[in-house]
Image (cartoon, coloured by chain):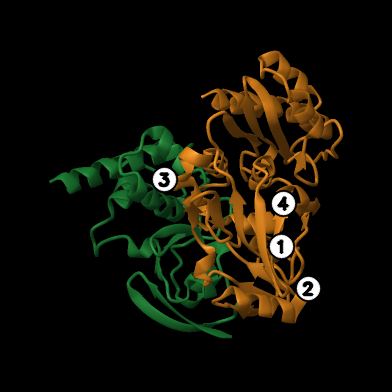
């Protein structure tokens, strides 16, 4: 399978890339790791006339941890998975990323690319939602920051404008009393999430004061589970409280069925994986 | 057409390619290095694994233009003259193949695995080869072949 013909550009700066995006607009696609885009182009599901390869923009790579965590958009899964500093301050990131695809996919795939592509079965989408991450973008009108909760708008669609580029993802460092987890039911060949759940909790005086749960794989869009989050607030995080909150997970979201798993099965698994993610996140928050 | 310069198995090549040319097609059809196979063509089976700057990648999901300026290693570049690489020897000694279609990718993925983890457990070998599918062996002898190579390479590094 061979992609259709395109013009190829490899800019070396963010400004140059945005110039090209502005010039070519909807005709152009950005190539990061290419592990979603190139398969789609080979199947001719995507046929951009212009491909803007951002891999030569060195400033988009790397993880910086200071007051917060700043992950460059072009940082590969491999870098996040093996980053020495991340494990201690946001262990859910390497934990989730290690479950993506296989070693060769993780060697190429990038965080920014996955978020911009917004595959309904991607893992990182649920994690950035649960972490309440900020997605930094650059466009012809300068920089802006989009909350993860505002970013995923529809199936394979985001709040990113056609001439904008994701430059970084910013998350806060998890401290005492905070815990997060990501668990998934992977498709055995592709390892995409049939259902994945990410959970974040904060404990104050033994009670849950903040809770965020996001589900991926089950429906067209990665989705925060507001009912589950509300049910957890103020609880002691006991197994009973988790079981009760997990029962309403997925209740109000669109859930899709396909040849791999029916809608009913996915609906059931959303509850199971929500429960597992919350249980682990709470155990981690307790330390 | 775009001109690219790539060093493959230590030899430098400068070629004109269409930007849409996949690295695996460049290697097989322009350089005649047919040891790298095309299996599923959908980034799942791992038959096309090669190294770019020492890192294993699926060459069916990489454009040749993305390898411009890079060092590429294919299965043809692994042996030292007539002396097989310990992984090639391991696959021979432990019957790590039947039809052999997956073998080049298996060996290139295993080489990357052993570089990062020179003494993996059997579980780590299986996990490390998740991106490579084999329809003949049932994987048992592939795990044994990688273990053979790991033992041989660590013995060589000690002596």
Local crowd at mark 2 within 10 Å, few (<14), some, or many (≥20)?
Answer: some
User: Which residue is denoted by mark 3 in the rendering?
Assistant: A84
User: Which residue is denoted by mark 4 in the rendering?
Assistant: A147
Residue drawn at 51 percent across, 62 percent down: A61
Q: Nearer the viewer, mark 4 or mark 1?
A: 4
User: Which residue is denoted by mark 2 in the rendering?
Assistant: A26
Mark-to-mark CA distance, 4 and 3: 26 Å
Residues at discs 2 and 3 in contact (Cβ within 8 Å)? no
Viewer can see residue B41: no
Q: Nearer the viewer, mark 4 or mark 3?
A: 4
Q: Nearer the viewer, residue A91 or B106?
A: A91
What chain does mark 1 sit on? A
Colour orange maps to chain: A
What chain does mark 3 sit on? A
Who comes first in sequence, dot 2 or dot 4? 2
Position in image of residue A83 (x %, y %):
45, 48
Which residue is farthest front?
A: A205
Residue drawn at 71 percent across, 62 percent down: A43
Q: Secondary structure at mark 2?
A: helix
Position in image of residue B17 (x %, y %):
55, 81
Q: Nearer the viewer, mark 2 or mark 3?
A: 3
- Mark 4 and mark 3, same subunit? yes
User: Which residue is denoted by mark 1 in the rendering?
Assistant: A43
Local crowd at mark 1 within 10 Å, few (<14), some, or many (≥20)?
Answer: some
Q: Nearer the viewer, mark 1 or mark 2?
A: 2
Quadrant in which residue A15 is drawn: bottom right
On screen, B12 above or below A99? below
Mark-to-mark CA distance, 3 and 1: 37 Å
């Amino acid at each position: 399978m061979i992609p259709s013909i395109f013009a190829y550009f490899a800019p070396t700066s963010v400004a140059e890339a945005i110039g090209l995006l502005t010039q070519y607009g909807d005709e152009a696609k950005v190539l990061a790791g290419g592990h979603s885009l190139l398969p789609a182009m080979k199947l001719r599901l995507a046929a951009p006339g212009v491909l803007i390869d951002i891999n030569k923009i060195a400033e988009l790579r790397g993880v910086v941890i200071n007051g917060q965590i700043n992950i460059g958009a072009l940082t590969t899964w491999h870098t996040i998975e093996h980053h020495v500093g991340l494990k201690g301050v946001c262990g859910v990131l390497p934990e989730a990323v290690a479950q993506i695809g296989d070693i060769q996919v993780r060697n190429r795939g990038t965080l920014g690319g996955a978020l911009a592509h917004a595959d309904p079965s991607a893992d990182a989408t649920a994690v950035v939602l649960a972490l309440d991450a900020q997605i930094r973008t650059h466009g012809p009108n300068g920089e802006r920051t989009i909350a993860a909760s505002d970013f995923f708008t529809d199936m394979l669609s985001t709040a990113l404008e056609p001439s904008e580029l994701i430059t970084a993802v910013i998350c806060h460092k998890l401290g005492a009393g905070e815990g997060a987890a990501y668990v998934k039911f992977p498709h055995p060949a592709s390892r995409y999430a049939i259902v994945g759940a990410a959970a974040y909790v904060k404990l104050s005086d033994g009670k849950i004061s903040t809770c965020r749960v996001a589900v991926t794989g089950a429906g067209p869009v990665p989705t925060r589970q507001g009912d589950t989050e509300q049910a957890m607030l103020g609880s002691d995080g006991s197994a009973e409280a988790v079981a009760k909150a997990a029962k309403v997970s997925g209740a109000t979201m669109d859930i899709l069925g396909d040849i791999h798993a029916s809608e009913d099965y996915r609906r059931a698994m959303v509850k199971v994986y929500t429960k597992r993610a919350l249980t682990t996140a709470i155990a981690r928050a307790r330390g | 057409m775009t001109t690219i310069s790539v060093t493959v198995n230590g030899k430098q090549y400068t070629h004109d390619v269409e930007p849409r040319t996949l690295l695996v097609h460049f290697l097989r059809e322009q350089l005649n290095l047919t040891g790298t196979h095309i299996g599923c063509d959908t980034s799942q089976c791992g038959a096309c694994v090669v190294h770019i700057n020492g890192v294993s990648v699926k060459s069916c999901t990489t454009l040749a233009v993305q390898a411009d300026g890079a060092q590429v290693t294919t299965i043809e570049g692994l042996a030292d003259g007539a002396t097989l690489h310990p992984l090639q020897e391991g696959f021979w000694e432990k019957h790590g193949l039947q039809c052999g279609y997956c073998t080049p990718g298996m060996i290139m993925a295993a080489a990357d695995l052993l570089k990062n983890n020179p003494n993996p457990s059997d579980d780590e070998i299986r996990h490390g080869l998740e991106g490579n599918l084999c329809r003949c062996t049932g994987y048992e002898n592939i795990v044994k072949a990688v273990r053979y190579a790991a033992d041989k390479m660590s013995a060589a590094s000690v002596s």
